[in-house]
Amino acid sequence: GAVVSQHPSRVICKSGTSVKIECRSLDFQATTMFWYRQFPKQSLMLMATSNEGSKATYEQGVEKDKFLINHASLTLSTLTVTSAHPEDSSFYICSAGRGLYSNQPQHFGDGTRLSIL
Amino acid sequence: DQQVKQNSPSLSVQEGRISILNCDYTNSMFDYFLWYKKYPAEGPTFLISISSIKDKNEDGRFTVFLNKSAKHLSLHIVPSQPGDSAVYFCAASGSSNTGKLIFGQGTTLQVKP
């Protein structure tokens, strides 16, 4: 069964709206979660690393004021797309791993399809 | 700068035959490699992984081969089944980037009955 839950699965909203996406680890604690973005027919691009109890680490070129990340507990990270515009329309996916080290596979949520009109 | 590359956007094979998906990487610091399978509108599902200390890892119908000198890995699926039809992503991680994955562009596999 799913080990990472992401909600909502789809959002359609008007330009200028802020949208919050939740990512939960269901049966394990995740001190670190990751947020990815995928454009059609392209790869998953890492946006940021969400760290429980501290600030997120953003990849180069990702606006931290645009994509707000909060990791308030060991099982929940949220990504808020602030004042979303049509160019923010994309597929957003989170991941979390059971282990602390790189030899543990990341488990992904089912993603959120964001469409900004 | 694409550190992980899947140069074949698509692959079509007949049911029962072998599917071979390829992946190349440029960063010699990568020490852990994974293959994920993805259906439309869903998140990637982990398939198989390999550590850089190994050159082969097998799990049922799936085998991953790693050639460190060539910075190349491949995923073999045998026998291929129609249910294997999906997009396959290879991903790499370095020991200094715990859990952080760099993905290739993906290869769409179609297995024909």
Image (cartoon, rainbow, N blue to C red):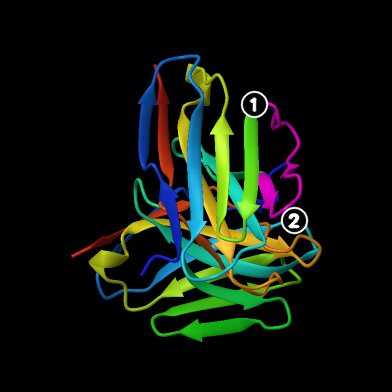
Relative to A65, does residue A73 appear above or below in the rendering?
Answer: below
A39 sits to left or right of A62? left
Q: Count numbered badges in the picture.
A: 2
Q: Main secondary structure of the magenta part?
A: loop
Residue at the limit of the structure toward the left, as seen here = B113
Give the residue number, with chain letter if any, for mark 2. Answer: B26
In the figure, residue B84 lies in which quadrant?
bottom left
Q: Is B33 in front, or is A57?
A: A57
Relative to A46, does residue A105 appear above or below in the rendering?
Answer: below
Question: Spatial distance from mark 2 to mark 1, Cα to Cα?
Answer: 31 Å
Could one spot residue A103 in this view of the protein?
yes
Specify few, some or many for label 1: CA neighbours under 10 Å numbering under 14, 14-19, or 20 or more.
Answer: some
Mark 1: secondary structure = loop
Mark 2: secondary structure = loop
Q: Which residues are magenta?
A: A48-65
Residue A51 is a magenta residue: yes
Chain letter, disc 2 residue? B
Could one spot residue A39 in this view of the protein?
no
Which amino acid, by three-letter code, is at mark 1? Lys
Q: Please tell me if label 2 and label 1 are on a single chain.
A: no
Q: Quadrant of the N terminus of chain B?
A: top right
Of badges 2 and 1, the one in the foreground is 1
Q: Is A105 in front, or is A11?
A: A11
How far across and how far down the image is residue A12, in percent?
Answer: 36, 26
How far across and how far down the image is residue B35, in percent?
Answer: 52, 66
Determine which of the numbered discs, if any, sits on residue A66 in the image: 1
Residue pictured at 55% horizontal, 54% vertical = A76
Which amino acid, by three-letter code, is at mark 2? Thr
